[in-house]
Amino acid sequence: MAAYLIVDTKISNPEEYETYKLQAKPIVEKFGGVYRARGGEMDVFESDLWSPTRIVIVEFPDMQTARNFVNSEEYAPVKRIRRDNAECTFLLVDGM
């Protein structure tokens, strides 16, 4: 069953964040991830619990593969780039 990595990102350093995007994509793909949304236009209709900024959605084959990506040695240094240049909400959700 598919799993979805959902990330809301408030970028503080756009130039450095581009480095993150370039380095993260091949690692995501190595783990079978497919970008379904990557910072495109959005309409927020209700925001009682959360006011999203920039949404990325990545589909993985399953929860374990998504967890393996998030916790991988390959992603660790790239994750630091993200954390140094943006504030994020980063979550996994099981698909149906």
Image: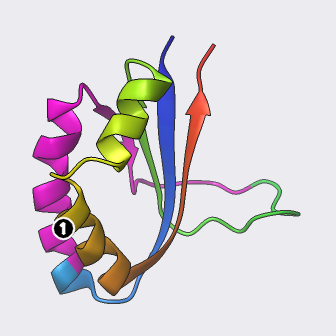
- Classed neighbour count for the residue bearing mark 1: other residues with Cα under 10 Å, few (<14), some (14–19), many (≥20): few
Q: Residue at x 23, y 40 (%)?
A: 28
5 shown above or below 21: above
| Residue 57: quarter of image | top left
Q: Residue at x 41, y 53 (%)?
A: 40
| Residue 77: quarter of image | bottom left
12 shown above or below 52: below
Q: Residue at x 20, y 61 (%)?
A: 21
Q: Residue at x 38, y 18 (%)?
A: 61
28 shown above or below 44: above
User: Which stretch is magenta?
Assistant: 17-44
- Report if residue 24 lies within the magenta region: yes
Q: Is residue 65 left or right of residue 44?
A: left
Residue 20 coordinates in the image, percent (x, y): 19, 67
Residue 51 coordinates in the image, percent (x, y): 71, 68
Residue 24 coordinates in the image, percent (x, y): 19, 54
85 shown above or below 79: below
**Residue sitting at the far bottom:** 12
| Residue 24 shows in the view | yes
- Reading the image, the residue beneath label 1 is 77
Q: Is residue 81 left or right of residue 22?
A: right
| Residue 36 shows in the view | no
Residue 64 coordinates in the image, percent (x, y): 43, 26
Task: Determine the secondary structure under disc 1.
Answer: helix
- Report if residue 9 lies within the magenta region: no
Q: How is the image coloured?
A: rainbow
